[in-house]
Amino acid sequence: MPDENHRDGDHDGRDHRDGVCRAEIHRAGGPGDQAERTQLAWRRTALAATVVTLLVVSRLVFGAPPPRALGAAVIVFAWLVILGVADRRIRSLATVSRGGRAADHGRAASSSADGREAIAASGSRRHVTTSDDDVAPRHHTDRSPATAHPAAAGAAPAILALLTAALAVVGIALVS
Amino acid sequence: MGRAPDYRFSLANERTFLAWIRTGLALVGGGLAVAAFLPQPRFTVARELIAVILLLLGAAVALRAVDRWSRTERAMRLGEPLPPSRFPATLALIIGGGAVTLLVLVVTAGLRP
């Protein structure tokens, strides 16, 4: 994520209408693609957490005696929390994804008004615009807190990181 | 705080965070696998040592991931350069060194109990 991309509307200092700049943005994917990629990343992460949970629980239940049902129950609960956090995040990203897809369709039809209406309907209007001048990544003047950002992850990353660390700590208790 | 960046940058930052979390989960899984599959009598000390190191690394990667995600988000909102980090290089060196050590152990002592 190069920091050069964050200058006000410019990409490496080039004009928005620069053909190279447009090609790079096209390669990066439209707004809908970005949200969908993030959704899939959450799914992969939830799957990885499931595999690690299975490893820990199988070791707790079928490993060296005595079987520790309480520990297994705590781990399963942590896993359910991870799944819940991931599911909630995926659902909120689906809103952004739908808005982005509508914007892409609006752009393809050269009808920025339709695109804007579609984004507004999905609650992302302030952050995704469809006119030709707004295709390039740009800062917005919104000064609302991070949670108001349509793509804001909120507390989900912190919860996921803490539960992953907790899984590691349980693993240490199991092997040592 | 600051200005909201283009949300595609925020989503890219989030995907990087998730990739680090998966790395942490893989390290935790690797630690458990080492504890389960290295033969007990011959590798007792090495087994526990490697497993604990991998599990500690997994926890460190997860905690560092959320710290990095939050600092990057903050830098983007304030229009500052992204914070530098030596963590990826350090982690690569530790894992590379650990893999070579494990390879030497397995080659010299064998995997049979």
Image: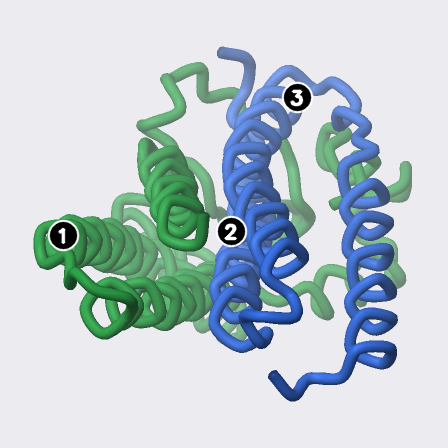
Chain colours: A green, B blue
Q: For the residues marked 2 and 1, what is the alpha-carbon distance in whole angstroms?
A: 19 Å
Q: Tag 3, which secondary structure? A: helix
Label 2 sits on what residue type?
A: Ile
Q: For the residues marked 2 and 3, what is the alpha-carbon distance in whole angstroms?
A: 21 Å
Q: Tag 1, which secondary structure? A: helix
Label 3 packing within 10 angstroms: few (<14), some (14-19), many (20+):
some
Is B64 rendered above or below residue B108?
above
Q: Tag 2, which secondary structure? A: helix
Q: Nearer the viewer, mark 2 or mark 1?
A: 1
| Tag 1 residue | A77
Q: For the residues marked 3 and 1, what is the alpha-carbon distance in whole angstroms?
A: 35 Å
Image point 83% across, 36% down: which residue?
A: A4
| Tag 3 residue | B75
Is B48 rendered above or below residue A1?
below
Is B18 rendered above or below residue A4?
below
Say which label, 2 or 3, has the lower sequence index.
Answer: 2
Residue A40 is at least partly visible in this image: yes
Task: Kindly check if marks 2 and 1 are in contact, taking CB atoms under 8 A apart as contact.
Answer: no
Q: Which mark is residue B21?
A: 2
Q: Nearer the viewer, residue B24 or A65?
A: A65
- In the picture, residue B23 is in which quadrant? bottom right
Same subunit: marks 2 and 1: no
Same subunit: marks 2 and 3: yes
- In the picture, residue A48 is in which quadrant? bottom left
- x and y, in percent, of residue A133 in the image: 66, 47
Task: Kindly check if marks 2 and 3 are in contact, taking CB atoms under 8 A apart as contact.
Answer: no
Image point 28% across, 66% down: which residue?
A: A64
Residue under mark 1: which chain is it in?
Answer: A
Q: Nearer the viewer, mark 3 or mark 1?
A: 1
Label 3 sits on what residue type?
A: Ala
